[in-house]
Amino acid sequence: MKYRNRVAVVTGAGSGIGRALTIALAADGARVAASDIDAAGLAATSAACAPGSVATYHLDVADRAAVRAHAEQVRADLGPASMLFNNAGVDLMAEIESMEPADLDWLFGINFGGVVNGTTAFLPQLIEAGSADRPARLINLSSAFGLIAVPAQGAYCASKFAVRGLTETLRQEMIMNDRPVTVHCVHPGVVKTNFGKNMRTSAEDAEVARTLFDKAALTTPERTARTILRGVDRGKARILVGPDGRIAAALPRLLGVSYTTLLARGSRVTSRRRTANPPSVEERNPL
Ligand SMILES: NC(=O)c1ccc[n+]([C@@H]2O[C@H](COP(=O)([O-])OP(=O)(O)OC[C@H]3O[C@@H](n4cnc5c(N)ncnc54)[C@H](O)[C@@H]3O)[C@@H](O)[C@H]2O)c1
């Protein structure tokens, strides 16, 4: 029971990585405050955990006042949080030339605004709950695309680079100010969750884009949760998930910014092949 007496806060807990984190934390003794905008998904997560181990909250992480009120509610219900997973996130597939600015605002409000809101609302509780022997943990979900930029993911990459910048700054400030809080930035490659299905896209064929996303997934959410929790236990500042997460970290180290030319050429070839050989009906409807 590694997380006994821990109050763990997980946003976006109604699906995918957030659900797998909630289940793993609850199984190992934590009392989990699980939140999402999707009530049905959240209920399913709670049902997969032992009775009484998870408290559920309807929450839009982009709503700053609601996140502040949520932090107070969690403290009242469970006590001060000692683990925070800022996990809720969304995707937008659109080239910058044709991107709707309103879509970028929507994505930034959740992916970056949500992390800022969660971090600032819960930081006082984490500082209060942590100690030198048992530090509190703050974990922010960035992405492999917070390490490298790729075509048609401009808004998403920008938001996840921003999460990395905020997280790496906060880590330094916690160390500098002797705060009992360790800070971790997570960079998964493509994980098989509902992320592709929930994506907004201006691509001509949204279904094909989502199918390709699912096909690219190399890691399960359960494996991702295990990698995250192991990385946190070991105090790792940067937690890479999956072979594609590790490749994303290596590319700019090996090639500098020239990796962008390489990826652009690769994407051009792939998109030409796709135009010449459009996916079959089976590929469009894998189920
Ligand atoms: N799946 C991947 O390939 C992948 C790769 C790298 C990073 N990530 C990141 O991991 C995190 C979790 O994604 P996932 O793959 O589990 O996706 P998912 O779509 O399966 O789950 C995301 C959850 O966030 C919730 N959510 C969306 N908007 C919200 C809002 N405004 N407020 C509260 N909850 C909201 C959704 O309802 C959903 O339950 C995201 O931050 C994502 O960017 C995912």
Image: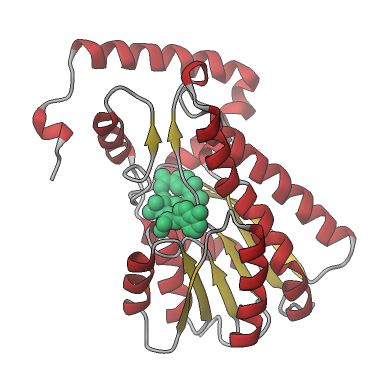
* 57 relative to 43 in the view: left or right: right
Visible in this render: residue 157? yes
Q: Quadrant of the C terminus?
A: top left
Say if residue 241 shows up in the picture. no
The quarter of the picture where residue 210 lies is: top left
- Residue 232 horizontal/vertical position (percent): 60, 64
The relative height of residue 28 versus residue 154 in the rendered view (above or below) is below
> Foreground: 144 or 113?
113
Numbered label tally: 0
Q: Is residue 277 above or below residue 183?
A: above
- Residue 170: give x, y in percent of width and height: 77, 54
Q: Position of residue 173 (x, y in %)?
A: 84, 56
x and y percent of residue 166 in the render? 72, 47
Left or right: residue 231 versus residue 53 is right
Q: Quadrant of residue 199?
A: top left
> In the rendered view, how is the structure colored?
secondary structure
